[in-house]
Each structure stands twice: as C-alpha cells, then as structure tokens.
Image (spheres, grey):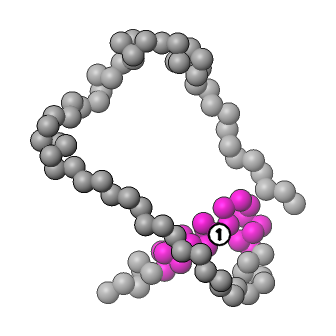
C-alpha cells in the first residue's frame, strides 16, 4: 500500500506576491529589532546527525516503514523522546 500524499498545494498566489513591491507588504505585526537585539543574538547551528548501522527487528522496521516517508526521522524522534523521558 502506498503512503497517502499529505502535502497540500499552497493557496498563496506566489506570482502576485513576487510582483508586489516590498513597500506594499504589511509588516506592522513584526516587532522592530534594534541594535541591542543583535548584540545579544547568538547563531545556533543544529548538530549534524551521524550515520550508523543499527539492527532493528523486522516487524518494528516494517511498522515504521508502513507509516510512509520519513520513517528514519520518526525512529530518531522516538529514540530522542525516550532519552528525554529517562534523563535524571
């Protein structure tokens, strides 16, 4: 059985937005960022994931694969949740 496509098509009119001058874009709900904000700001890059070889029971792997694309990411999320739940 193929995984159901859950990606929805965007309802944004990208051509109209692309043609719109910046001055017509409403940014009134975005707070102004002053120099003090940037003085305190830190760039935080995500850590790269490591590639490993892992032995998993066939039924467990089949269950994750049956969930569709991104099954390796979901396995990582489950493992991460377990780690956080068991930290002291």
At a point 17% along the width and 42% down the height, the residue shown is 37
Magenta region includes residue 68: yes
Q: Residues within 10 Å of mark 1 (few under 14, many from 20)?
A: few
Q: Residue furthest left?
A: 36
**Which element carries disc 1, helix, strand or loop?**
helix
Residue 47 sits in which quadrant?
bottom left
Q: Residue at 54% across / 74% down in the picture?
A: 50
Residue at 14% of width from left, 37% of height from top?
A: 35
Q: Main secondary structure of the magenta part?
A: helix
Residue 67 on image: x %, y %: 72, 64
- The quarter in which the C terminus is drawn is bottom left
Q: Is residue 4 above or below residue 87?
A: above
What span is colored magenta in the figure?
63-82
* Residue displayed at 67% across by 38% down: 8
Residue 26 lies, in percent from the top left, at 36, 18
Give yes or no for residue 77 being in the magenta stretch. yes
Badge 1 is on which residue? Answer: 72
Can residue 38 be seen from the camera position used here?
yes
């Amino acid at each position: 059985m193929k995984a159901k496509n859950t990606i929805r098509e965007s309802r944004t009119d990208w051509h109209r937005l692309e043609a719109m001058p910046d001055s017509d874009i409403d940014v009134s709900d975005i707070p102004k960022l002053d120099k003090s904000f940037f003085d305190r700001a830190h760039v935080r890059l995500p850590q790269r994931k490591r590639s490993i070889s892992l032995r998993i029971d066939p039924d467990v792997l089949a269950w994750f694969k049956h969930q569709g694309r991104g099954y390796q990411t979901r396995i990582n999320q489950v493992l991460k949740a377990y780690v956080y739940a068991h930290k002291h």
